[in-house]
């Protein structure tokens, strides 16, 4: 039974590796600090728990893991009482961080690659992720596509070809990348994030919020969700139409990622009243450090398109200010105002407490 919490020694090792060795700029606010704790949490879930000697370690949510870090790190202990507010503010802050990614089109510009979240009931979307500090939009898109699909789009991405949209008050930009063969083998470099790939026919994707709510069911009874897709479909069709009118549409030669295993194929049959044809979906477990099994699936045919509704305006990002923490537990508002991460003091106290 996986019920054992990480030991003090293990937490010390994780803290030193992912938190106490960070540059000062990454420790200026709770928002930046929790991004680092999130990376430490992924390491715990993806690598530490997979070791045979750690088979009994409990799987933790990010919130549970953050609570353990706040309990064990002396410099964070005064803020344990404020953790609920700190964590809620962090989730709000994450939704304001700009997102960048790419729309990968086949050479004929009739199909687009979508990725599904790791869980079988997760929604489909485009490969994308949060913009890192000091990273350009194009660099972020290239990194996220490489991490989530194993495809290097360096040299394929043209910075003038993009679609902007806002999803849940989050500013997003997806670059349009052409000439990705359907035979491309995809192998994500991240673990437990991508569950399946699918080539979908652009003209059959939902182009409105109402269409995205319709049910598309595969042969296994799984529903296909397109809530993160529809805002881009109408402008994507317009862009493709313009390219064809110009007689263009051929991009640079794609750089394909090497894979250790051949692609796996699985057919999917939609069952919604408004859906027809095939739908692409196949479960696939990703690996994080190296390449893993890939899934390349046939194109799908969801419902016929309708006019897309306009996305809402983006929200402005906010960051937490900083100051030195008091020695006694603080109330939520005071804790947030007086936070400062004293690395040397924490290292000294760690050596005495662990």
Image: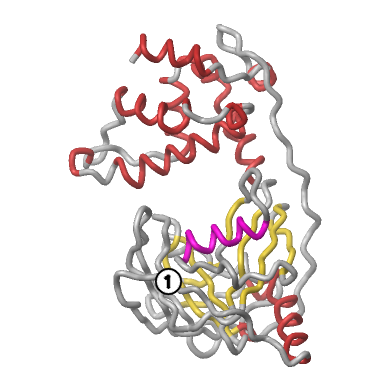
Dominant secondary structure, magenta: helix
Region rendered in magenta:
137-149
User: Position of 134 compared to 223: left or right?
Assistant: right
- How is the rendered protein coloured? secondary structure
Q: Is residue 15 above or below residue 183?
A: above
Q: Tell me the quadrant of the picture where the C terminus can be found.
A: top left
- Relative image position of residue 351 (x, y in whole percent): 36, 13
- Give the residue displayed 77% in from the left and 63% down from the top: 311
Q: Tell me the quadrant of the picture where the N terminus can be found.
A: top left
Q: Element type at marker 1?
A: loop
- Mark 1, residue position: 186
- Give the residue displayed 61% in from the left and 56% down from the top: 140
- Give the residue displayed 35% in from the left and 77% down from the top: 263
Q: Is residue 247 above or below residue 351?
A: below
Front residue of this view, candidates 309 and 195? 195
Q: Residue furthest top?
A: 327
Q: Residues within 10 Å of mark 1 (few under 14, many from 20)?
A: many
- Give the residue displayed 63% in from the left and 81% down from the top: 251
Is residue 138 part of the magenta span, yes or no?
Answer: yes
């Amino acid at each position: 039974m996986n019920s054992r919490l990480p030991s003090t020694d293990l937490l010390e090792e994780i803290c030193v590796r992912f938190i106490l060795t960070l540059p000062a700029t990454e420790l200026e606010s709770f928002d930046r600090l929790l991004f680092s704790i999130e990376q430490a949490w992924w390491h715990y879930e993806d690598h530490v728990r997979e070791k045979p000697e750690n088979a009994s370690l409990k799987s933790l949510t990010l919130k549970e893991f953050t609570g353990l870090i706040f309990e064990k790190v002396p410099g964070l202990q005064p803020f344990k009482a404020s953790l609920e507010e700190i964590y809620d503010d962090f989730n709000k802050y994450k939704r304001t961080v700009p997102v960048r990614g790419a729309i990968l089109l086949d050479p004929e510009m009739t199909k687009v690659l979508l990725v599904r979240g790791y869980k079988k009931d997760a929604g489909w979307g485009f490969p994308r992720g949060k913009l890192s500090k000091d990273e350009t939009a194009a660099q972020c898109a290239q990194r996220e596509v490489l991490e989530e699909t194993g495809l290097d789009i360096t040299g394929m991405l043209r910075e003038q070809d993009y679609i902007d949209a806002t999803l849940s008050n989050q500013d997003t930009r997806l670059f349009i990348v052409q000439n990705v063969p359907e035979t491309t083998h995809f192998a994500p470099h991240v673990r437990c994030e991508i569950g399946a790939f699918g080539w979908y026919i652009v003209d059959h994707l939902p182009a409105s919020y109402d269409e995205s709510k319709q049910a598309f069911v595969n042969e296994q009874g799984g529903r296909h969700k397109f809530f993160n897709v529809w805002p881009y479909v109408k402008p994507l069709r317009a862009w493709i139409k313009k390219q064809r009118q110009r007689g263009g549409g051929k991009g640079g030669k794609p750089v394909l990622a090497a894979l250790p295993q051949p692609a796996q194929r699985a057919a999917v049959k939609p069952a919604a009243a408004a859906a027809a044809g095939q739908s692409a979906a196949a479960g696939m477990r990703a690996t994080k450090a190296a390449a893993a099994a890939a899934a390349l699936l046939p194109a799908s045919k969801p419902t016929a398109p309708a006019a897309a509704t306009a996305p809402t305006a983006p929200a402005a990002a906010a960051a937490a200010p900083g100051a030195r923490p008091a020695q006694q537990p603080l109330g939520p508002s005071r804790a947030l105002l007086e936070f400062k991460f004293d690395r040397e003091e924490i290292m000294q106290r760690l050596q005495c407490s662990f």
